[in-house]
Amino acid sequence: MIDFIKLIKNKFALIAMDKDELGLFAFLAVYLMSWTLLSALLLLSSELDSIEQVVWSQSWQWGYYKHPPLPSALLHALNALFGGPSVGLTAFAAQGCSVLALFYVWLLAKQILPKKQAIVAVLITSLIAYHNSRAFAFNHNTVSLPFTAAALYYFYSALRCPKSISNWLWLGLVCGLAMLTKYSAILIIAGFFVVIIWQRLWSDTRIIWGLLVSSVIFILVISPHVLWLVDNNWIPFTYIHDKLAESDSRLGILIGFVANVMVRLVFALPLLLGVWFFIKKGTIKVKTIPEIDLSESNHDFRFLLVVLLTPLILAMMVPLLSASPLNSNWVTAFFLPSGILLTKCFYKQLDDTQLLKVVSGLAWITQAIILIFFFAVALIYPNIVGSAARLNFPGEALANKVTEIWSAQQKEPLAIVISDSWTGGNVLLYARPEPTLFIDNNVLESPWVNARDVEACGAFIIIVKAETVPDAYSMLFSQATAKGEFSLSWGHAPRGKELHYSWAIKPPMPGAVSCRFTTQSDKAAQYNYSPPPLKKGD
């Protein structure tokens, strides 16, 4: 009995000892729930990138015409678990990536800083716009956050304990997953090699062998996608090449890039100014710290500096060398070490308890302001003035209208919609059972469906009304058995829009094979489906 009481006391002592870390977990949990619930309750649609992922996540592919496959695969798994896509689910998936990234930042920070200062570093990092309001969209930039943070953690751990094979195995895995998320991960990985060269770690055979192990795992992870790239003529790189078309002003590109990045970093400024104020006021006192191992401290400083600056410098070399545009969103995952570096440089001599108390309060307040400001600007204000905004797009009304028209014309359930990603993606967001989108009648953009499926299942074709039907849709409209138009209000006068759509129905062809998208079970079978080669003109 005495031993049991001691055990209970020890458990409570452990909880008391870790109350600061429990506070961090509560902060992250409240953050994630707030963004998810407000999105699910208030929003009518999602960001453009999130809608694109809703479309791509219909089918497991080893690549897409723009990007590698991992974000779409992750959303596909979530959709399967929760019965289809939704606005709240995409917000949860996106902000969940940010929370998971901050968890890995915390694991890394604990190895470099004292426990309470590690939490301070995470709270500062959480205030960078890339990790909060910009993480609202479920896209490749946002999904790259947790894999980049994990790569930083496992790389640092591997350098500290190079004989541990598990760190090198995990490093290879998360670096491979990062590459399957966004190709810019290669710039992060380049920073790892700069660390090894600058720190002269190549002389340690354990590190060289560890890198070989990581490299083997990395190659195994990305190899299916590489094979897909070969089979599909490296189509994402064609897209990237076109996206990076030469611009006129190298200096203008860099100035615009730096300015946009600074705007995304400024959310952390109120907290930093608040800490400075409380230091001046004496609320946070400077403490006498014991002698530290300068060699280890310098190693950590160089590590953080290199992994922060290397990918940024390499990214900025692109417009300098080729005058290609550089989008500030492409460096979303590059600032994960910044909070740790800032804390190590400026806050290491401050009283940990007082510093954490002040930073925690400021972080809670700032995150609440960011949340309120985001929904006020993106939704509440547009609703008040009636302007058309992405997040108040009438996606549910559109989906209901499409299914109503189809049900009035056809007995079979709606299986295929042919439209652009935004229009069709909003139908997918609300229609149940979820149909399949054939993007702009283009097999390259939607390889999970083709003309033979349209013959077997029929299709609902919907486009924004224009004077002439686009070439990609002209034959479909000419073959349709029913056509029409309808309008939807997006916002209200005087700033709203009236959306005018043209629609057509192409019924299943008599004698065609059974539609493989008719039921959810049939739809699940598509992931192993290899369509027969198309004839010329399909």
Image (cartoon, rainbow, N blue to C red):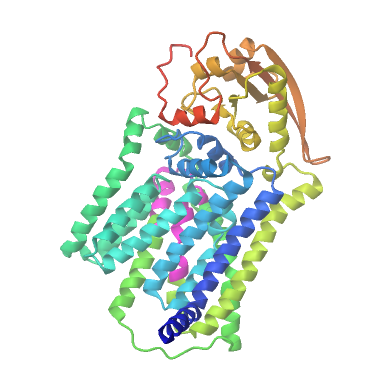
Q: Which residue is at 54% across, 47% downward?
A: 138
328 inside magenta stretch: yes
Instruction: Work out which residue is located at the far bottom of the displayed protein and give it.
Output: 288
Number of numbered markers: 0
Considering depth in this image, is 313 or 320 the residue closer to the camera? 313
Considering depth in this image, is 479 or 465 the residue closer to the camera? 479
Res 23 → quadrant: bottom right
265 with respect to 288 (left or right)? right
Instruction: Give coordinates of residue 395: x percent, y percent.
Output: 69, 37
Instruction: Give coordinates of residue 230: x percent, y percent.
Output: 32, 31
Considering depth in this image, is 385 or 414 the residue closer to the camera? 414
Considering depth in this image, is 68 or 495 the residue closer to the camera? 68
Instruction: Give coordinates of residue 537: x percent, y percent.
Output: 48, 12
Residue 62 vertical position relative to residue 370 in the rendered view, above or below: above
Magenta stretch prevailing secondary structure: helix
Range shown magenta: 313-340
Q: Which residue is at 40% across, 24% downward?
A: 530
Res 389 → quadrant: top right
321 with respect to 276 (left or right)? left
Residue 509 vertical position relative to residue 332 in the rendered view, above or below: above
Q: Which residue is at 49% across, 24% downward?
A: 449
